[in-house]
Image: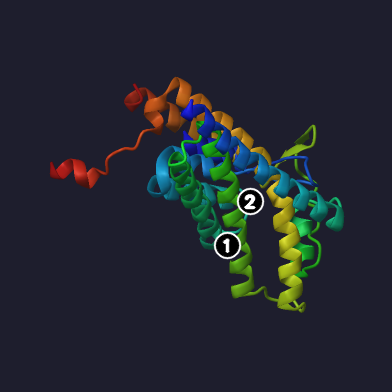
């Protein structure tokens, strides 16, 4: 279900800031955790490449970015439980921070690997990408509010979905 | 009462983050102008602007990246698989 929702949203261009898209990686991380979330984002990236959204050669880099989002959102969501924040705030802040970290990882990958056929300096690239990240974070606000409401709704109607599941290895040993 | 106070803490953190992010985002948007994601990325890294293939189906400005038919087929397959798994294991 998470894979289908994430794939459906990931391909849709929103008419905001000239055209951007959401990806629901943070929601995936909060709902299923980093382990299963990693599998989901890998599947979504492969299917996205299959329809021509992102190249096959970009799957590894996209996976790293998405995995950072999944893990950070999950970590922040869990960390905010310690200050007793409500479900909406935990999910929304987790999403916002997760997407910011994902953007930072994206910039780091580009700066480290470089881009063929580009003559501008690393400083110029960093400045340009910083502006890109800043615009992307505008959409992160929308995604964080959406994620906050979705997680709050799930907390109300199916609280069992948000409970920590015991790892398989632990359950089989007993 | 302590629960209510802690709820406010979370919202205050979120509101503060939104104000900061929104201010930086609007500054960057004004600075770079109205461009789509690919054009904005190309100009950020110094690549030539990508050409628009012009075959995307659009509703109220919302359009689908990549091949539209493949998108519908793959999404339909995912929904069928998700529905089947929910019926088998979800209850």
Residue at 51 percent across and 51 percent down: it is A46
In this figure, which residue is indicated by the disc labeled 2?
A: A53
Residue A72 percent coordinates (x, y): 50, 51
Q: Is residue A26 above or below residue A100?
A: above
Q: Give the SS element for disc 1.
A: helix
Residue A25 percent coordinates (x, y): 53, 45
Residue count near mark 2 (Cα–Cα under 10 Å), binned few <14, some 14–19, many ≥20: some
Q: Nearer the viewer, residue A132 or A77?
A: A77
Q: Give the SS element for disc 2.
A: loop
Quadrant the C terminus of chain B occupies: top left
Corner quadrant of residue B63? top right
Q: Is residue A87 above or below residue A172?
A: above
Q: Residue A105 bears which disc, if any? A: 1
**Residue at the outermost left position:** A174
Residue at 84 percent across and 57 percent down: it is B32
Whether label 2 touches label 1, CB < 8 Å: no
Cα separation, mark 2 vs mark 1, equals 20 Å
**Residue at the outermost front position:** B1
Left or right: A168, with B2 as reference point: left
């Amino acid at each position: 279900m998470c894979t289908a929702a994430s794939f459906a949203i990931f391909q849709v261009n929103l008419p905001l800031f000239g055209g951007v898209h959401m990806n629901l990686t943070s929601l995936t991380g909060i709902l299923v955790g980093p382990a299963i979330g990693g599998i989901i984002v890998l599947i979504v990236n492969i299917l996205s490449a299959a329809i021509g959204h992102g190249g096959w050669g970009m799957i590894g880099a996209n996976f790293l970015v998405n995995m950072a989002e999944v893990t950070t959102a999950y970590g922040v969501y869990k960390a905010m439980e310690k200050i007793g924040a409500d479900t909406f705030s935990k999910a929304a802040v987790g999403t916002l921070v997760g997407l910011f970290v994902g953007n930072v990882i994206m910039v780091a990958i580009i700066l480290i690997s470089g881009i063929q056929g580009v003559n501008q300096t690393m400083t110029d690239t960093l400045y340009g990408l910083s502006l890109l990240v800043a615009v992307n974070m505008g959409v992160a606000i929308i995604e964080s509010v959406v994620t906050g409401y979705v997680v709050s709704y799930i907390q109300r109607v199916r609280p069992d979905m948000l409970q920590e599941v015991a790892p398989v290895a632990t359950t089989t040993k007993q | 009462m302590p629960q209510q106070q802690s709820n406010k803490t979370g919202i205050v953190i979120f509101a503060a983050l939104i104000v900061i992010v929104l201010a930086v985002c609007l500054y960057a948007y004004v600075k770079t102008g109205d461009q789509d994601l690919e054009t904005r990325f190309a100009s950020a890294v110094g690549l030539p602007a990508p050409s628009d293939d012009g075959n995307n189906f659009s509703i109220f400005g919302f359009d689908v990246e990549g091949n539209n038919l493949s998108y519908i087929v793959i999404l339909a397959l995912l929904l069928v698989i998700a529905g089947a798994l929910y019926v088998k294991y979800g209850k």
